[in-house]
Amino acid sequence: MNKKAGILYGIGVGPGDPDLITIKAAKILNQVDIVFAAASTKNNHSLAVNIASEHIPDSTTVKTLRFPMTSDKNETRRAWKEHAHTIIGELEQGRNVAFLTLGDSMTYSTYGYILKHVQTLAPHLEAQTVPGITSYQAAAARLNTPLVEGEESLMVVSGVKGGNRLRELNGKPENVVFLKAYRNVPDIKAAIDESGKYPNCVGVKSCGQSSEEIIKDIEELSQRKPDYWTLIISKQSTNNGTQEG
Ligand SMILES: C[S@@+](CC[C@H](N)C(=O)[O-])C[C@H]1O[C@@H](n2cnc3c(N)ncnc32)[C@H](O)[C@@H]1O
């Protein structure tokens, strides 16, 4: 008789504070046979594993899957496919697998691509995705600042193209979160300034981690050495939550 296949769990571990992992994620991490997490080909480090480590039993196998930090789409696709095959191999051996992702599992996450490949290559396998607290939810909480109120809207945008995503929009949303700002903070700042609409901008670095910093002056942030684990929350309103929205 064929072995029953394992289940793939996509686990969002939250932005940094291990206490911000959901109870559901912690229960699953306690039970799976193997934990995978993404790491760069340059080093074997996984922040997601560090964050989740207190919820992973010592006896559980933890493996990093190396992804190239490149803009070469073919190379990236090759890595997704290869790693999807590795995960499928484990699932078909009957092992339950967790794939860790920082923040939320469905927000700018490698897991999203891995999941698509697993579902395409092995549609018979089961996947369950466990959401995590996103970096920007944690940052808004840290700042005691509402993300959206009343009839407002929120745009979550990648900063990989600098400020252009904001420039392209005619009607500007009341609130914008820039993730993956990294080297493009100066251009994002320029786009924010050009719009003349966002008097309330804050940068948050390594939210929930020991190296956390809150940078209230975006000009200062734009002059700093680029840091990957930084986001910007920009608000049209200067309401800090003390007025009714
Ligand atoms: C590939 S995206 C991952 C987003 C993540 N899945 C989430 O739910 O927040 C990586 C970007 O998220 C932001 N980020 C993730 N964790 C962060 C943290 N702890 N503090 C500040 N920004 C963070 C940074 O802008 C970083 O460049």
Image: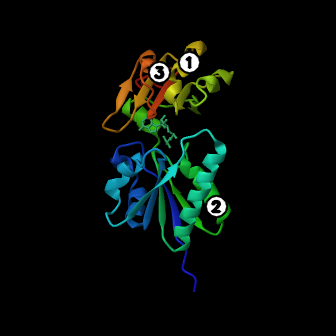
Residue assigned mark 1 = 192
Q: Mark 1, residues whose alpha carbon is within 10 Å: few (<14), some, or many (≥20)?
A: many
Q: CA distance from mark 2 to mark 3?
A: 40 Å
Pointer 2 or 3: first along the chain: 2
Circle 2 residue? 119
Please provide percent x and percent y for residue 156.
56, 34
Mark 3 close to ligand 1, CB under 8 Å: no
Say few, some or many: other residues with alpha carbon within 10 Å of mark 2 (under 14 / 14 to 19 / 20 or more).
some
Q: Label 3: state its secondary structure.
A: strand
Image x and y of residue 76, in percent = 61, 47
| Label 1 with label 3: CB-CB less than 8 Å | yes
Q: How far across and how far down the image is residue 196, in percent?
A: 57, 13
Residue 245 visible from this viewpoint:
no
For residue 185, say whether it is visible.
yes
Horizontal arrangement in the rendering, residue 27 relative to residue 175 (left or right): left
* Residue type marked 2: Gln
Where is mark 3, residue-wise? 201
Could you tell which of marks 1 and 3 lies nearer the N-terminus?
1
